[in-house]
Amino acid sequence: MLGDISRQRVHQITSRGSLAGYDRRGRLHPCAYRLVVPAMIDAFVARRRRPILVIVLVATAAVVLALLLQEGSPKVVDLFAVVVGSAAVLLVLSMLSWGRSRPAVLVVDSQHRAFRAPQSATDVYFAAAYVVLLCLPIAMLSSSSGQDLAWPLVSCLVWAYLAALRVIDAWRGTHLHLRSEGIEERTAQSSLFVPWDALQAGHPQRPSPRAHQLTLSYSHPHRVGRRGLGSGKRLPIDTVHPWFIADVMRHYAEYAEHRAAIGTPDEYRRLLGRLADGTGTPYPDDNP
């Protein structure tokens, strides 16, 4: 059973044209499957990200153990082929997921009183690929002699660190939250908090429909909180339509009286109705 976000996502995909929709009997048109099925898979991966990551970690540990126990055996070549092949598949899936159209929706998180961006399947694919590829430097380290240990050890530690960052971000599921106090973006490497009043009037502007970052302009930059890497002016928007999230942020920056209700279903319905006023034109496909 699809979740709320995946159902909205499928509806958006299948309503873009006569071919990518339903036939007269209400059945999904065959041409739509090439769009709907990948979206359903991404929705499942994002929703079940934690069990998937646990399975990947356990499977990788088993492969590493097998590599160590069968060192020098011809079967090691087969194991390396499995590792490289699995990583290649995961990287291809991550790139395909990253290139798909993003929905003009936010998730209502009533428990934490926030609107958050949809969860990312791309992060799960990337994290799994990094974990699987960790087998290679570990295998190099185990087969190195004492004098040649430095480079394999460094590469193993660096790759383990990068894999850990990816897993942490994928485990959390989403990085972008809109709260009554402001905009919060948090990853394993950094965090950003932008009070609504710190945004420049009339901003953020709509970026390119294909943009994966939103440029923020500040009228009070000293009020912006930033930790870790990054400039604090570019916000990743990998899982939500760039025009939609820009319109939402600009709306709350302008209308302070509605901020206190952020994170409630009633406010989200009001927000969607407000954004639908005017021309009523739907957001264009961000990956035509």
Image (spheres, helix red, strand yellow):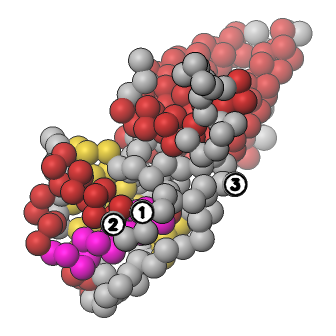
Position of residue 150 relative to residue 194, above or below, is above
Q: Is residue 88 visible?
A: yes
Query: Eyeballing the image, is 97 above or below 198?
Result: above
Report the disc number at residue 277: 2
* Disc 3 secondary structure class: loop
- Dot in front, 3 or 1: 1
Q: Earlier in the sequence, mark 3 or mark 2?
A: 2
Looking at the image, residue 132 sits to the left or right of residue 40; the answer is right
From the viewer's perspective, is the residue at label 3 or at label 2 nearer? Answer: 2
CA gap, disc 3 and disc 1: 20 Å
Q: Residues within 10 Å of mark 1 (few under 14, many from 20)?
A: few
Residue that label 1 marks: 280
Instruction: Give the quadrant of the N terminus.
Output: top left
Residue occupying the point 89% across, 10% down:
74
Q: Quadrant of residue 193?
A: bottom left
Q: Magenta stretch mostly in which secondary structure?
A: helix
Give how far apart the Cα atoms at labels 3 and 2 are. Answer: 25 Å
Q: Residue furthest bottom?
A: 219
Instruction: Please give the range of residues in magenta.
Output: 243-256
